[in-house]
Amino acid sequence: MFNNNKEQYWENVHSKKSEKEVSWFQKYPIDSIELIKSLNINLNANIIDVGAGESRLVDNLIELGFTNIDVLDISKSAIEKAKQRLGKKSLGVNWIVSDINEFVPIKKYDLWHDRAAFHFLTNKKHIKNYISLTSNYINDKGKLIIATFSSNGPIKCSGLDVVRYSKESIEKTFENTFNINNHFISSHKTPFSTFQEFLFASFEKK
């Protein structure tokens, strides 16, 4: 899929569907929140949520008191919907419309969070680029949370191919720069009452 087609694809998804009409919707992203709480990160830490879409993680990070939050997604529609939902609170968030493959950060992060974006990268070059981004733009001892479909998860999402991961394969993917500290399997109930198995993995930069 060429880049401009990919952007248009996700624009169509987010402009034509409400947040509750996509399989990844979570009213309260409990797994991500509990993982982040367990890391005891400073409230002024630099945080980025990659491929966030209309995720409500940012709402909860604000409620927890975090003050330096970046939200990135390829879809402008998704970003605009999230901003509208937050109202005045959105003014304290740095919103980034970008394909992760073209993202050039202007800062380093203490926490890089990605739920259900990384597994859409099926091209080895794009995967390598993503690994390079996390290696170069996460601070020493910084944290990386990646949530992907597990080995038993779906082989497609929103009509697109994905790469499924086991604990061993996700650990190997990031092993040159990160140590895995925690991992678990989570069964996500979609708005359509089906279930998707996710692998959550938490890393620390070496």
Image: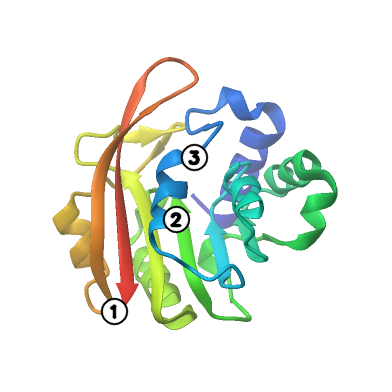
Quadrant of the rendered image containing residue 31: top left
Asked if marks 1 and 2 touch (Cβ < 8 Å), the reply is no
Between 145 and 125, which is closer to the camera in this rendering? 145
Quadrant of the image containing the C terminus: bottom left
Of the residues shown, which amino acid type is indicated by label 2?
Answer: Lys
- 49 relative to 102, above or below: above
Of the residues shown, which amino acid type is indicated by label 3?
Answer: Pro
Of the residues shown, which amino acid type is indicated by label 1?
Answer: Thr
What is the C-alpha distance between the residues marked 1 and 2?
23 Å
- 59 relative to 181, above or below: above
- Of pointers 2 and 3, the one earlier in the residue sequence: 3
What is the C-alpha distance between the residues marked 2 and 3?
12 Å
- Identify the residue under disc 2: 37
Q: Is residue 8 visible?
A: yes
Quadrant of the rendered image containing residue 140: bottom left
Q: Report the mark closest to the observer, 2 or 3.
A: 2
- Image coordinates of residue 83 in percent, x first then y, are 77, 47
What is the C-alpha distance between the residues marked 1 and 3?
27 Å
Between 61 and 169, which is closer to the camera in this rendering? 61
Instruction: Tell me which residue sits at (45%, 39%) in the image.
Output: 30
Quadrant of the rendered image containing residue 180: bottom left
Callout 2 secondary element? helix
State the mark number for residue 177: 1
State the mark number for residue 29: 3
Q: Does 54 sit left or right of 160 as displayed?
A: right
